[in-house]
Structures are given as C-alpha cells and as structure tokens.
Image (cartoon, rainbow, N blue to C red):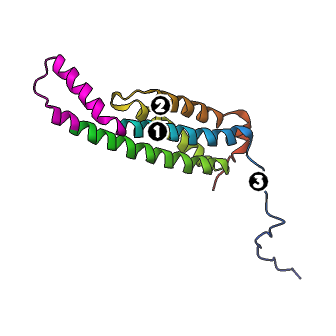
Amino acid sequence: MTVPEEPPVMPTADEAVVRTDPPIAVRTSFWLWALAGLLGVVGAALFFALRDDWALRQYERLRAAGDAVVTAGQVAETAAGLSWWLLVGSVMFLGFFLLLAYQARRGVRKARTLLLVLAVFGALFQYSVGRVTIYGLGSALVIIVAIGLLFTRSARRFFPVHDR
C-alpha cells in the first residue's frame, strides 16, 4: 500500500530563509544614491531661483554676439521652461534613486540593473542643456561611485542569481 504525498506547506516564520543584512558596500551605495539625488535637486532649485539672472546673462551674451533676432522676453521664457524642466526632472530622479536603491538594499537584483541604466541617464541629465555646475558634477561623481559599489565582490555575492 502506498502512502499519499502531503501537499506542500508554506514555511513558518522559524523555517523561512532569513536574508542577512546587506554588506557595507550596498548600504553605503544606498546613501550615496540619496546624496546624488539631493545634490541634483539642490542644483535645480538654485537654478530655479536664479533663472532671471541666467536669462539676463544669456541675452547679453547673444546681443554681444550680434544675434538681434532673439528678444529678452524669449530668453526669459526659455529660462522659465528650462528651470521647471530641471526641477521636476531632478525630483523625479531623486524618487527613482531612492526607490531603486531601497530595493537594491533589500537584495533585488533587478533593482541593481535598473540603477545601472538610471545612472547613465542621471549622469547625462546632469550635463544636459549646458548646465554644468558644481552640483551637477558632484551628483554625477556620486552616481559613479554608488553604481561602482553595487558591483563590488561583496555586493555581487549579496544579490541572488535567480530572482523570481
């Protein structure tokens, strides 16, 4: 006589596999992603606050170059649109950085890959539209260090090979 097999049972809390704490490289990377996003937002907020000065300097530069087609109002409108675009974009990058870095800190391998893609776009965003500032340079440098930390040997061991 054969004994029927028992159906699989969900593990109890004691039987569940407990994931270890993330290595120091992953924890440090999380905070670096937050710092990179904050640097981007601070730079965008400063540009937003100083956009009229920037527009005036750009208009004077264009006038000195002999470009009489562009008016001061057009340059001011461009500065206003650019400042909003940069501010909203920087806040979105901060949100994505925090969300994905938190997931990576939990050990989600896909988050690490998405952070790599986002790092490329984030660094390019900091250099877009000729707005290279110390905040953009700092943010791009922190992004490079943060993504590098996620691919160190200890961090690679932390992320599972098969993520379902």
Residue 42 bears which disc, if any?
1
Q: Residues within 10 Å of mark 1 (few under 14, many from 20)?
A: some
State the residue in front, 66 or 113: 66
Q: Which residue is mark 2?
A: 135
Q: Which mark is residue 19?
A: 3
| Up-down relation of residue 74 to residue 63 (above or below) | below
In the rendered structure, does residue 123 fall within the stretch colored magenta?
no
Q: Amino acid at mark 2?
A: Tyr
On residue 54, which mark appears? none
Q: Earlier in the sequence, mark 2 or mark 1?
A: 1
Q: Residue at x 77, y 76 (%)?
A: 7
Name the residue type under label 1: Val
Residue 90 image point, x, y percent: 43, 42
Is disc 1 placed on a helix, strand or loop?
helix
**Image-quadrant location for residue 65:** top left
Q: Are marks 2 and 3 in contact (CB under 8 Å)?
A: no
* Magenta region: 48-76
Which image quadrant for residue 79?
top left
